Amino acid sequence: MAAKQGQGKARVAVAKTYKIYIDGKFPRTESGRYFTLEDNKGKVIANVCRGSRKDFRNATVAARKAQRGWAGANAYLRGQILYRIAEMLEGRREQFIAELKLQGATQRAAGKEVDTSIDRLIYFAGWADKYQQVFSAVNPVASSHFNFSVLEPTGVVSIIAPDDSGLLGLVSNVAPTIVGGNTCVVLASESMPLSAVSFAEVLHASDVPAGVVNILTGLRSELTGHFASHMDVNAIVFCDGARKTARTVQELASDNIKHVIARADVDWSRDSAQHPYLIRDTQEVKTTWHPIGS
């Protein structure tokens, strides 16, 4: 009798809670706050962490701790790790397509975004041991010195990923940043955050050292200022936003002379959105003078 009564009740689905990714771990936001993500029919599809200033500070500490070791890794190893991320993403292709569809993409658009993200990781993996040859130089000088310039990683980079691209925009900005020896803290798309957290799971299962990539979710209105003003961040990549917001980022970043890289209005699905200058953006030029002769 009890079984028959239970058959008529509608089952309440358990929505997955997507956590943030800091220092190779998946903590809940320290604020305890979440926001619900709904599909185009108003159905709740997930609970998403509403990251806080403290979360960002923790992520920055982790990124700084990991930066020296990651910068010291040889270029071949960094390229191999990016290739491994692409392999892992390929293996979970259907999951990412399903998540993008949940967030409003069509089957075709979702498949293209995932495939392009995989190809983009491989593209930058190929540049890992080549960009130095392209951008470094031996400089002619009018003295008895050997003078040459090479690139060095900027350090810790904060990235405000594109809001209109759940996976590809994030990958297109993270890959060139870390392949050059930087570590990063990323603010995922606010409207399409699911793929970013799943991408963190891919990173966790690959060979990326803890702290190299840290991914937060949350409201841009709350976190953009922290991404721009933190004194232990060396550069900020800012992918979209109103003119007023962009000006605020520039002003806050000037407090410790952060390098601001603005990448607004970029169609990340085009081949023109991948080039080695994206690596160069988060590098510093080091010039060395060496005396020669007697």
Image: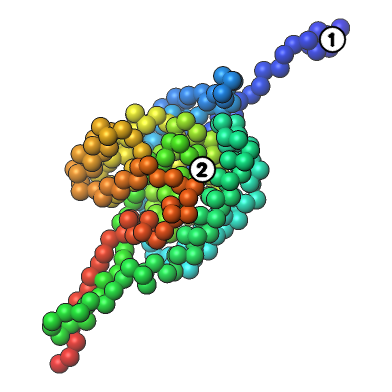
At label 2, the amino acid type is Leu
Q: Nearer the viewer, residue 107 or 52?
A: 107
- Tag 1 secondary structure: helix
Q: As drawn, is 86 to the left or to the right of 2?
A: left
Which quadrant of the figure contains the N terminus?
A: top right
Q: Residue at x 58, y 46 (%)?
A: 112
Task: Give whichever of 264, 163 is nearer the camera.
Answer: 264
The image position of residue 156, as x and y in percent, is 33, 51
Numbered circle sitting on residue 167: 2
**Label 1: which residue?**
4
Which comes before the other along the chain, label 2 or label 1? 1
The local crowd at label 2, few if under 14, some if 14 to 19, many if 20 or more residues have their Cα within 10 Å, is many
Q: Measuring 43% from the left and 54% from the top, which residue is drawn there?
A: 272
276 or 81: nearer the eye? 276
Q: Position of residue 249 (x, y in %)?
A: 26, 38
- Using residue 91 as the reference point, say whether residue 3 is left or right of it: right
Lateral position of residue 39 relative to residue 20, left or right: right
Farthest left residue in view: 143
The outermost residue toward the right is: 1
Q: Residues within 10 Å of mark 1 (few under 14, many from 20)?
A: few
Q: Quadrant of residue 148?
A: bottom left
The percent coordinates of residue 129 (x first, y second) are 44, 69
Q: Is residue 50 visible?
A: yes
Labels 2 and 1 touching (C-beta < 8 A): no
On screen, residue 73 above or below 204? below
